[in-house]
Image (cartoon, rainbow, N blue to C red):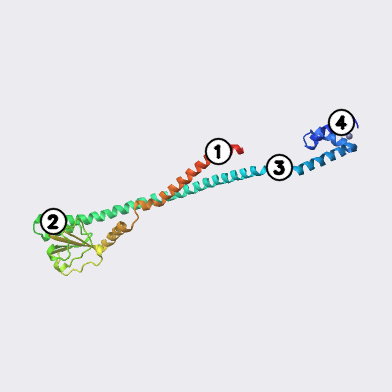
Amino acid sequence: MKNECYIVRDLLPSYIDQLCSDESKQFIEQHMAHCESCSHMLYQMKEELNVVEQRDLPLRMEQKKPFEKVSRFLKAQLDFTKFLKVSFGLSLLITLILLVFAFTNLAEWQENQQEQQRVEQEQQDIMDKTFAAILAQGMPDEAALQSVFEQYQEQLEHIALFASEDTENTPTWQQGPMTTFPVDYKKALIVVGENGNMTEAIVPNDYDIGTMVMANEEWVVQFEYKESYLPTVENAHQIKHYFPTVWQLFSMPTVFTIITLFIFTIWLYQKRIMKPMETTIG
Ligand SMILES: [Zn+2]
C-alpha cells in the first residue's frame, strides 16, 4: 500500500457521502483508476452501507408514522382554515349584493308606502270633511256636500248621505272609512256628483275597494271612486296588504350577515389555534 492509499482511504467515507471537495474527488478517482485494492475497498464500503440501510428501513418507516399522522392532521387543519377563508369571502360577497339589492328596492318601497298612506289619508279626509259639513249645518244640505265633492272631483264619482235608521246592518259608529257594506242608493237622502244633486238611479260600483263607507250614530256617508282613479286605489290596497314589510325586504341580507359573521368567527378562532402549529411546522 502506498502513502497515497492511506490518504484515499481516509477520504472514502466523505467521498461516499459526497462531502469532499472537487479536488479531493478528482484525486480519489484518479487513484482508483490504477489502484485495485482501494477500488475494492470502496466497493465493500458501499455494499456494507446498502445492507445497513435496507435493514434499518422498516424501523425508520415505523418511526416516521406518528409524524405523518400529525402532519396529515395539520394539513387538514390548514385546508379547513383555507376553506373558511374562501367561505367567508363568498358569504360576504353575497351579503353585500343582497344589501345593495335591498337598499335599491328600499327607495321604491318607501315611495309605495307614502303613496299608500296618501290614499288612506285622502279617504279619511273626504269622510271627515263630509261629516264636518253635515254637522256644521245641523241639518244636512246639498250645497255643503257639493262643496266637499268639488274638492275631490278628480277622485270621486259621487258622495251619498243616508240616515242611519234607513240603512241595514249599519254599525253604530266607525272610526274610519271602510269598504264592507255597500248601501242601496234608493234610500239615500242626498247624492252629489259632478253636476250637483243626482236624482237618477245610481248603480253601486261592484268593485268593493272603490266604494267607501263611514257612519256615525245618525248618518252614513258613502262615496264612490271614479273609474279613472280606481287603479290608484287598487295599487294602494295591494301595497297595504301584499307588499313586503321592511323586515321581509331585509330578511335575506340579515340572514346572510349572520352567516357571514358566524363563518368569520370560526375562521378567526381557527387562525388563532393554528398560529402556534404553523410556527412548529416552520
Ligand atoms: Zn490505493
Q: Is residue 112 above or below residue 183?
A: above
Residue topped by disc 2? 133
Amino acid type indicated by mark 1: Lys
> CB of mark 4 within 8 Å of CB of mark 2?
no
Residue topped by disc 3? 60
Q: Looking at this view, is 270 or 102 the one in front?
A: 270
Amino acid type indicated by mark 4: Tyr
| Quadrant of image for the C terminus | top right
Residue 114 located left or right of residue 4: left
Distance, label 4 to label 3, CA atoms, is 34 Å
Badge 2 density bin: few <14, some 14–19, many ≥20, Cα 10 Å: many
Residue 55 located left or right of residue 219: right
Distance, label 3 to label 1, CA atoms, is 30 Å
Mark 4 or mark 2, earlier in chain: 4
Residue topped by disc 1? 275
Q: Is mark 2 within 8 Å of ligand 1?
A: no
Mark 4 or mark 1, earlier in chain: 4
SS label for mark 2: helix
Residue 200: quarter of image: bottom left
SS label for mark 3: helix
In the drawing, what numbered circle is on residue 6?
Answer: 4
Amino acid type indicated by mark 3: Arg
Q: Is residue 144 above or below residue 267?
A: below
Q: Residue at x 31, y 57 (%)?
A: 239
Mark 3 or mark 1, earlier in chain: 3
Amino acid type indicated by mark 2: Ala
Mark 2 or mark 1, earlier in chain: 2
Distance, label 2 to label 3, CA atoms, is 106 Å
| Quadrant of image for the N terminus | top right
